[in-house]
Amino acid sequence: MTPEIAGEPAPGPVDRLISRAAGEQLAGRADEAMAILAEALRLDPNHTSALTFAALLALRREQAAAALDYASRAIAVDPRRARAHHLRGLALQAVGRGAEALVDLRQAVAIDATLVDARLDLGNALLAEGDIASAATEIDAVLAAEPSAIAYNSLGNLRARQRQFDDAITAYNRAIELDPRLSQAHGNLGMLQFSVADNDAAIASFRRAVALAPDRPANWSALLFALSVSDRATAGGIAAEHRAFGERFAARIAPLPAVVPAPRAGRRLRIGYVSSDWRRHAVAVFAESLLAAHDRDRFEIFCYQNYAGGDEVTARFAALADHFVPIASMPDAEAARRIRDDAIDILVDLNGHTAHNRLPLFFRKPAPVQATWLGYLGSTGVPTIDYRLTDRYTDPPVQPEVSGAEALWRLPLTQWCYRPYVEAPDVGPLPASTAGGITFVCMNHPLKTSRSAFVLWARILAAVPASRLILLATPYDGQRARVLAFFAGEGIAGERIEQVGEAPIATYLARYQRADVALDSLPCAGGTTTCDALWMGVPVVTMVGDRPFSRSGASLLRNADLTELIARTPDEYVRAAVDLATDRVRLATLRAGLRDRLRASPLLDPAGFARAVEDAFDEMWERAVAASRA
């Protein structure tokens, strides 16, 4: 939330310039307004109104460093200028200095208690820093003074963080009632709906957010991800939506001047990986083995970290990379310049349309060759990304390519390289041998499941007497109740469904010691969870679908030589699960041998996987050099 600043006409030349700049800003001509303010500051470098106005415009232009400079200069001239403290707090927050931002935001409110927008921004900043109680105090105070739509939106964010989901939904809906055009409220409501697995409602909210703010890439990414895991969307429809995203932003984000790729001539290729997931995250489970196995005589590795903060996994990645560069607080233009200055040859996106992605950066084409891999199995829709790394099982050659974006680069065996968790306990005995019945499990995130999956799981439970199903569930009681209600409607008693929440890795892995058979989700199949289940001795039944998101399970099982567990139709899926569940000897044999099977597979061959990826990078570069000479 940023304040409005308008200069007041005055006889002095600087004040007249500020007034002109305000008119340009109100007319939507920010570049012209900033040029006029630059002239005003040339005449009087210490004019506090001009400096404060310049800080505001710089923030709106995503030039946080410039905004910080302007606001700091204004405060140096007038330490009691509340609006300058407000803007400096926002600028500090934008560059990742959250604790310092709180000092200035508090100062702004202390100087001028009537700055309701500054107080709301203080509440938002406190929430971002994890001080929930203090955030609640500030947001409640704002609502008491000025119950605006934007304040109710912040209340929704607060209630969501407090896991008071019904109250959060009520707050977002109140914000929308007060201002139906507040795109943030629609988007935040959609994110909450998506997180509690109400995907149909989330898609509707995201569509409204896109319609209201079509030039905000985050709105599109949320919609596209939700569509990709929806059982109501078709592959063709999903592809069309991704193309629309690419076309819109390709017309709005100009690429940097092209770099002509030159032959390697013995030098190392510079590979840049861009991700928000250099931390304890599913992506890291696969990416870490690749980085550890890269040939440093041939490749120089840059990791661009698009996430503020980190953990012990972040530290491992920083040690594995030749260069570990935080870019979360950098605007796209600055990050693109940094990547160009680093002379990156091949830039690889590891997010796609998942949270904290930097796809707008890739429209700028800071590297001569760009690719995407791992974090998002479908096309990004970004026309400046040249390749999508995949394999022949996730993207079969006979499957129609409907994306119209990246060229598919199929690695020879697999696009996965699994690194088992060190916390993994030993594989235990078959639970069914002592539990009196089969226990099925699905530890995939609830947003990957669907009514289509529940229908098949109910059929399986009905066909296997005394069987049970353990599901990873959302923390929202309403959604958990809906799951139980669905199964009850299918004749499956509630005591046969166990819903568990997210847990530390060791606890999560130990759950597999209670399970006999894993049921893959659909239409969005598992990746890390599939490997985890196999490593813990639990075979996984999957079904091939109409999109790459639906074929990750098939790709993993193919590479683990478990093709008999891959179904092509719903009936085959049910039959495979029931046949497996009713053959205790086969189950026990599989359980005892799955770890050795994985160890012998391409999924646990980091050296071989790294060579395959590096060969791909070499050929991509050679093609780019040849194309530049054509």
Image: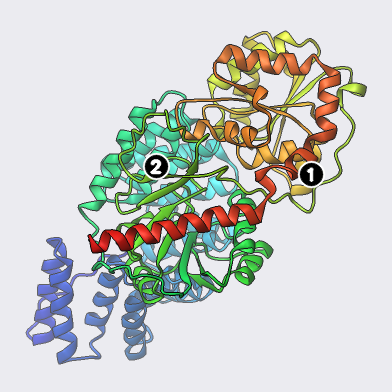
Which residue sits at x=50%, y=72%?
325
Number of callouts in the render? 2
Query: For the point 22% across and 81% down, which residue is it?
Result: 50
Q: Position of residue 240 (x, y in %)?
A: 30, 34
What x and y, as percent, mark residue 300? 51, 71
- Image quarter where the N terminus lies is bottom left
Between 230 and 421, the one lying in front of the other is 421
Q: Which residue is mark 1?
A: 507
Q: Which residue is mark 2?
A: 379
Question: With respect to residue 116, does 525 lie above or below?
Answer: above
Is residue 165 positioned above or below 302 on the image?
above
Towards the viewer: 544 or 358: 544
Residue count near mark 2 (Cα–Cα under 10 Å), binned few <14, some 14–19, many ≥20: many
> Residue at (37%, 78%) from the top-left corner?
68
Mark 2 and mark 1: span between their CA atoms?
34 Å
Question: Is disc 1 placed on a helix, strand or loop?
Answer: helix
Task: Indicate left or right for 320 with 12 as reference.
Answer: right
**Image quadrant in which you'd find residue 279:** bottom right
Q: Amino acid at mark 2?
A: Ser
**Amino acid type indicated by mark 1:** Thr
Q: Is residue 514 left or right of residue 105?
A: right
Earlier in the chain: of badge 2 and badge 1, it is 2
